[in-house]
Image (cartoon, coloured by chain):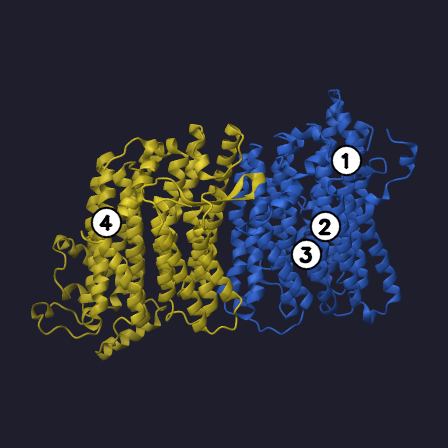
Chain colours: A blue, B yellow
Amino acid sequence: MESLFEKVNPDLTLLTPHLIVLGLALLLLLADVIIPRAKHVALTWLTLVGFGAALVANFFFIEENRSTFNGMFRADDFAVFINLIVLTGAILSVLVSSSYLQKLESPGSMPLAEYYVLLSFSVLGTMIVGSSGDLIMVFLGIEMSSLAVYALTGFARNRLTSLEGALKYFLLGLFASAILLYGMAWVYGATGTTNLDGIQAALSGPQTEGALEASLLLALLLLVVGLGFKIAAVPFHMWTPDAYQGAPTPVSAYMSVIPKVAGFAAMIRILVQGLSPLREEWVVILGILAVITMAFGNIVAISQRDVKRMLAYSSIGHTGYALAGLAAFGVVTAADDRSVSSVLFYLFGYAFMNIGAFAVIVWLQHRGHGVDLEDFNGLGARSPMAALAMTIFMLSLMGIPPLVGFYAKYYVILATVEAGMLWLAVAIVLASAVSAFFYLRVVAAMYFAEPTASQTPGRTPMLGFGVLTMALATVFLGIFSSRVLDLAQNWVNAFQTTI
Amino acid sequence: MDSFPILSVITYLPLLGALIIFFLPRATPDQTRQIALWTAIATFAASLIMLAGFDINQAGMQWTEHMEWLPGVGINYDMGVDGVSVLLVVLTTLLSLIAVIASFDPIQRRVREYYIAILLLEVGMIGVFLALDLFLFYIFFELTLIPMALLIGVWGSANRVYASVKFFLYTLAGSLLMLVAIVATYQAYYEQTGVRTLNVLQLAEGNYGHNFQMWVFAAFFIAFAIKIPMWPFHTWLPDAHVEAPTAGSVLLAGVLLKMGGYGLIRFNLSLYPDASRDWAPVIIVLSVIAIIYGALVALVQPDLKKLIAYSSVSHMGFVTLGIFAFNMQGMMGAMLVMVSHGLVTGALFLCVGVVYERAHTRLISAFGGLATRMPVYASIFGVFMLASIGLPGLSGFVGEFLAILGAFREYRWAGVISMAVVVLSAWYMMLMFQRVVFGRAPGEPPDPHDGALLSSVQPDEPDKHGFHGVPTVSGGSGMSMAGEENLESEHVPRVHDEPEFPEDLEHGADARAGHVPVWPDLTAKELVTLVPLLILTVVMGVYPSPFMDIMRSTLELVLQPFGSVGV
């Protein structure tokens, strides 16, 4: 029984990582005013230190599994892992962004400080989604995360495609948020609470037939549609290609990972923690959605010549793989359930390889190239290291061992097979075979084609360091995935779900 | 065994070499070659140490290594070697060494990357034969894909990109289904025993349902059938071979194809014995088709490499034929065919490489009279050609004879048909040899002593000269040669028009000028690559029993579930 003191005095220590990121955002706002523009380069370091500190603080909450604010905020192992993915992704994005903002896309038009502020708020929002124990918190986090990314998408304000992508993303995103909120309202109406554990308890009790069932099903559909937009699942993916293509490349890199993580975190919080009694309904929906998504994303990606657009479709495909992992939820006993952990590991590995792929594109843009497939022609001869890194990322996205993408896919396949959903496993490997086609084209262009355009020299030490880090992580994270996997598997302790 | 981890040393030595080359970007091409050479020598030496310490009376795994890796999902680092894999490992290290030496002169472009690719390929190939954990096996299996695709795509000839991508997609598609089958087997074993493992020896003890076995077997089989490659999964092979650089072809034919045969024995037979028995008739039929088809298509190939590639399809058919006969003769025959095919076909590709370096074409019609111009080469080439046909006393004979014998005991018709196809293989090989080595080169003046034939020779049809130049090489196929002439005459002119061999046209200019280019005989390096294979081919043909002894007890173990142990 909680004492009144505890009720009115939340345990703020549990919020340490979040508070650090919030502090960083506020500090950046302040710094923007105080520090002269010319010295804004220092803000990059400040941002890196801030995210780094939050990442370190996050590790103190492993196996804590506590909650505060009357169960609205949870510092459990699921939240820890989401924070891990988000903060890692954020640090990698900063490494990719800094030089791009200063030098490319009409220099000076993209102020560093504002960029990092928006980035921090988006990161904070995603972390809140991961730590939420309440529908309201989920929604707040999602909105906070999305709104900042809408602005980031249009950050190249002198370029029409950037604005177009931002507007599409914004309008469809708002629409999705409304649907999501509507679904939450229905859940509240049916159960009388917005607390996720409360919802689960309400649904686990004796069920009234008929009306409640129908209303819950409607709520479920609305929730899946709303979250489907956020994670870019087919058929709710329409905004993705334009937004990815139009956004400044580092934003595309960021956008391909962190808002997706927010969507998946919300999905897992709501469906697994709150609506697990409705498991049989949503598992089927997710399974079908997964197959459609991976098939569509990978097949359409084949016809793309613009590499950013191709990566957009490929990211849709990867949404499908991760969804397949989630669809395996709840069949085996909780301790053995690998569904959520496979999704978590997938997203973690995906952060490295996908941001890495975009980073190489940024690297090319710095050297006077565009983002078409032809711009990769002959890269293997011109800049062997960049080509090697891109090859690693492409092969990892393809799922070739021993790169992290293979392990991620393997764990998802394992989860689906353990759940007896062999058809999902087969769909995953077939989609992977299709995906080899377009990923390989990039590799083939780099090594087999003759260079078409000349290259201007450029100096981007931070970006180079970022690419190197991600390439090394892509190679070694899978091989040494044992610890990470254990950490992800802790999710079963995070949710007190009874299935 | 907690002793020295020799298997890991063999596997990762090439990786070490590749890393050294990678981190020495300033090394001259010659230094890079030296590093690669010494790495390959060290790896070969290590594999010989393993061979020397190998106990032939022990049927199970030897030199085993075990390390926990991803215990949560039953993945461990398990390595081991037994009678099935030991010779294939040594074959791999030997052929890799030869491939490194054979690339010294031909590869002058992007040398560093080339040797990194070769050495990484070696890591994958050795690992495939040594891994006992299915997950580990899969990793090595896929690891061979990328370096090989790069070898073909970067250092290959005209149509290399197409061949490279085709090779990659084909093999990847096949192996992905195997991945699902691996996970399904793991799960089925877990449901039975509550133990999470991917160790193939442990998984083999499980009892799997019949339906389950049937489809899981099929998934594994397709992956390996593509590698072997079996008809109708073979279409990537001719393209890959034709476009690959010489060393790539050597490793592709010598080792990569063996991964398929090895996989069938190690995984399909031991994990799914019931399904193996039920699928066997189908596979026997496919094997016989492959044997006939490969030989027939080889007959009409104008390109030397393509001819050998199709002959590989035919020879590898004997491997599957022998394996799925489920008796000692067949199994041992299959193993010996694999080893012998690795030596002989590897050598044949080297032989093609030798003339390619001089003529820059692989068209059979562009050659002739090599016997007088390159006598040493002609003799060595001849021995390998005869070994490939299966001449008794050379390595090819032992394996194919045993495989046919094994098949004959179980499926009489299959034995009879495949025996007859051996004649076909004599036909296409000898015809090729006759044209390339004995026949007149295009533009070479007719032999004045050959007056009888002189009148029938049309000077503007140089393609037929080879055929007319030497009336009968093999008496047995003399009758059918007329038919072959027809095939040839409609085939070759088309190829002659191909614009992608400018050197060939130049050669044609030589022909018009009426003189034949002078090519030096084998260089020392080329001799170094060919002679060891020559010695092994002869030794294996004359005295095959050490090769058989080393695998006998393991094969008895493999055949145990199938009841029939012969010899």
The residue that label 1 is drawn on is A183
The residue that label 4 is drawn on is B544
Q: Are marks 2 and 1 on the same chain?
A: yes
- On the image, the x and y values in percent for residue B303 come to 30, 61
Residue B552 vertical placement versus A461 (above, below): above
Q: Amino acid at mark 1?
A: Gly
Q: In which chain is the residue bearing label 1?
A: A
Give the CA distance from mark 3 to mark 4.
61 Å
Front residue of B453/A206: it is A206
Q: Are marks 4 and 1 on the same chain?
A: no
**Based on the displayed image, in which of its 4 quarters is residue A357 positioned?**
bottom right
Mark 1 lies on a secondary structure that is: helix
The quadrant the N terminus of chain B occupies is top left
Per the rendering, the mark at residue A253 is 3
Q: In which chain is the residue bearing label 3?
A: A
Q: Amino acid at mark 4?
A: Pro
Give the CA distance from mark 1 to mark 3.
30 Å
Give the CA distance from mark 4 to mark 1.
76 Å
Q: Amino acid at mark 3?
A: Ala
- Give the foreground label among 2 and 3: 2
The quadrant the C terminus of chain B occupies is top left
